Image (tube, coloured by chain):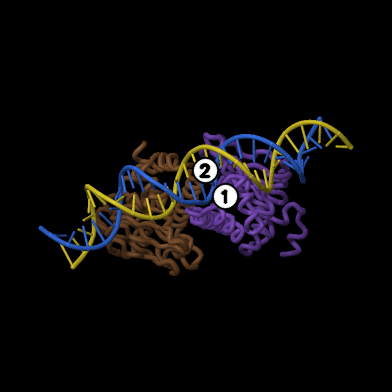
Chain colours: A brown, B purple, C blue, D yellow
Amino acid sequence: MIQFINALPKIYQPLAFYLMQRNEIDQEKLQRILSCFQPLKVSRKQVLINYSEICRAYYFINTGSLRLFTVNNAGIETSRYFAFEGMFATALPSFIDQKPALEYLQAIEKSELLAISRKDFFDLVDTTAKFSHIYREILEIGFVNAQKRIYGFQGFDALEKVKWVIESQPKFLVRVSNKMAASYLGISPSTLSRTKSRL
Amino acid sequence: MIQFINALPKIYQPLAFYLMQRNEIDQEKLQRILSCFQPLKVSRKQVLINYSEICRAYYFINTGSLRLFTVNNAGIETSRYFAFEGMFATALPSFIDQKPALEYLQAIEKSELLAISRKDFFDLVDTTAKFSHIYREILEIGFVNAQKRIYGFQGFDALEKVKWVIESQPKFLVRVSNKMAASYLGISPSTLSRTKSRL
DNA sequence: TAAAAACGTTGACATAAAGCAACACTTACG
DNA sequence: CGTAAGTGTTGCTTTATGTCAACGTTTTTA
């Protein structure tokens, strides 16, 4: 199986490993799944999904990073998710219910992605037990993370939030700019800067 | 089918309707699903799942209401979910990954529930396509709601949070005490009281 | 490679909300 | 049914954090 994966085009190898890692898949199924994903290069700051757009694809990150954020009436940015190499990302609520995203999916840096259309995605979910299971896992993990974030933030002051994010996502503050990290933590960039300096 | 449901014991009727509403199920499957649920009466304030406990059941509410909350080191309560008649509730993260809940599931009032064990639940998920689909829906809705809550709260002041909750869950402030509502909104009870008075 | 734009840090100041306490009112329960 | 515990409201004071602005540094891009 490892040989099979190594024989694949390089850009499909990380995804193949991702899929294999979760649960054993036979070559045929794996091939079928991979064939639904199209390579896609995006530049720094490029927007993949716009605020009023309906999300029609799911993205796997080969290199680079993406972020999900929204902007409220007052012009305040809120980031809710950052995805790096080897992770999936999309505006999932919109992907699920096909309503306007009300958020942006944007590349933070120049990135190489694999994209699967919504149609192909749900065809796989409905016809491939393994893929259905992977989707379930994506939802479960997404749900659990969202809960952790709600508890991790509520009633916490700036110092506690920063400690929490260092503990639960050690790489986060290193890879993400202060400004974006602040918009994720729900504090101002100045407060984040001050807080880090007294850790 | 309606006749079939009406012929069921009263306590199973709301759940039967809930299941039917989502997608058509034949009588046999419905019967099989219902037979996994055991009736359970709990008193006001009774705790169904404790902080360090591993969650082993899913609950459907016939009458009454439940809430999920946690208490941090400083003794601050944070509520993350309230469930009323006709809704499902459990400490889902713990139910999924079988780690300590790190939260409490508690009856707000005297309630009548139907409980299904984790084993039976996942047996149904794995053997009954319909039930698998219902689980997927539960996860999707849970995920989407969590995202809304994250965006709905971040960077909002007390007034905006209260308006947001009135808009997105009109019944909420009516059915839940000020204290609990405040712990859900992440503001103090006094601030909630003051905020409501200037709406 | 140099100019411009964006970013991080820090200080001074303003402010929303927390904490505390007192009181009236409601609800719970022996 | 009456006492006790809990809840909601409101005033006063304190405090954490946001805002604004200035400055030096890093990053971007032409």
Q: Which residue is mark 2?
A: A155
Instruction: Determine whether label 1 and label 2 are within 8 Å by CB.
Output: no
Which residue corresponds to the image point at 41% horizontal and 51% vertical from the top-left? A184
- Would you say A173 lies left or right of D27 here? right
Res. B107 visible in picture: yes
Q: Which residue is mark 1?
A: B185
- Would you say B172 lies left or right of C14 here? right
Residue A41 screen position, x and y as percent:
28, 64
Above or below B166: residue A173 = above
Which residue corresponds to the image point at 37% horizontal and 57% vertical from the top-left? A67
- Which class describes the residues within 10 Å of circle 1: few (<14), some (14-19), or many (20+)? many
Residue B131 screen position, x and y as percent:
58, 56
Per the image, label 2 sits on a secondary structure element best described as loop
Image quadrant containing the N terminus of chain B: bottom right
Q: Chain of mark 2?
A: A
Pick the front one: B179 or A93: B179
- Which class describes the residues within 10 Å of circle 2: few (<14), some (14-19), or many (20+)? many
Which residue corresponds to the image point at 43% horizontal and 66% vertical from the top-left? A51
Which residue corresponds to the image point at 34% horizontal and 44% vertical from the top-left? A171
